[in-house]
């Protein structure tokens, strides 16, 4: 299963929070190198 | 139970990811103040963020249903997690939210996508590694 590049562009416009509650744009995570994003179900 | 186990598995492969200059990012959906505890529990050393809004999960269409928690694999994985010391210590985040894995290259091209079908199901490590080569 593969997804469209357009979906990655939309994903990149969203942000996640770091430990200090700072918003980090998702696109910044993969701008310099291949990145593995692991979405876990919860912090359980 | 299972997400901890998967993160420990990833951590065990970190040398390989480092050698390939691949960045590893774990994203949860609890509150930011849960990040440190998760790091301590898993020994995970790389980037760790959270998406309490679940917007990224929703965009990627990761399943969210009660049904997804009740599969056979869930039970099997729960036993594995409990017997290896990675049982669920208390859920932080949305218990019905599933996860998955996305590998993206520096040009924003998707190299791999895997949506978990049920609790306990996650992307095979060899598939993730292959997508990074």
Image (spheres, helix red, strand yellow):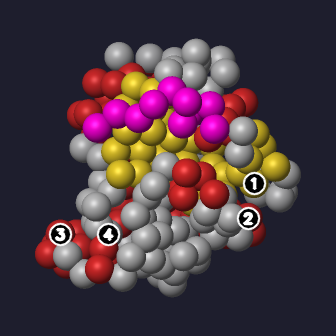
Q: Which residue is mark 2?
A: B32
> Is A3 left, or right, of A19 in this rendering?
left
- Who's the residue at 52% across and 80% down the image? B91
Q: Are marks 3 and 1 on the same chain?
A: no
User: Separation of disc 3 and disc 1 at Cα?
Assistant: 31 Å
User: Is residue B28 among the parts visible in the rendering?
Assistant: yes
Pinpoint residue B64: horizontal percent, then vertical percent: 43, 70
Tag 4 residue = B119
Spatial distance from mark 3 to mark 2, Cα to Cα? 29 Å
Figure check: A42 above or below A26: below
Q: Are marks 4 and 3 on the same chain?
A: yes
Q: Quadrant of the N terminus of chain B?
A: bottom left
Q: Is residue B86 visible?
A: no
**What range of the chain is rendered magenta?**
A1-10
Tell me the distance, in whole angstroms, between the alpha carbons under discs 1 and 4.
24 Å
Label 1: chain letter: A
Instruction: Categorize mark 3 by other alpha carbons within 10 Å: few (<14), some (14-19), many (20+).
Output: some
Nearer to us of marks 2 and 4 is 4
Q: Which residue is mark 1?
A: A17
Q: Nearer the viewer, residue B29 or B6?
A: B29
Residue sitting at x 30%, y 74%: B68
Give the chain of mark 4: B
Q: Which residue has dot 3 on it?
A: B73
Residue B23 drawn at (x, y percent)? 55, 29
Q: Are the residues tagged 2 and 1 within 8 Å (C-beta)?
A: yes
Tags 4 and 3 touching, CB below 8 Å: yes
- Dominant SS type (magenta): helix
């Amino acid at each position: 299963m593969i997804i469209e590049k357009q979906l990655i562009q939309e994903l990149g416009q969203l942000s996640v929070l770091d430990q200090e509650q700072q918003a980090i744009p998702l696109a910044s995570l993969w701008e310099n190198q291949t990145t593995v994003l692991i979405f876990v179900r919860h912090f359980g | 139970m299972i997400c901890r186990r998967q993160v420990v598995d990833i951590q065990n492969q970190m040398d390989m990811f480092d050698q390939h200059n691949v960045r590893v990012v774990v994203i949860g959906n609890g509150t930011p103040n849960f990040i440190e505890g998760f790091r301590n529990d898993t020994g995970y050393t790389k980037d760790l963020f959270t998406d309490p809004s679940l917007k990224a999960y929703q965009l990627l269409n990761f399943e969210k249903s009660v049904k997804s928690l009740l599969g056979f694999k869930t039970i099997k994985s729960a036993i594995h997690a409990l017997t290896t010391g990675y049982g669920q210590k208390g859920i932080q985040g949305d218990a019905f939210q599933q996860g998955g894995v996305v590998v993206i290259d520096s040009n924003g091209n998707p190299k791999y996508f895997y949506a978990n079908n049920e609790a306990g199901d996650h992307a095979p490590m060899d598939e993730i590694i292959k997508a990074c080569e």
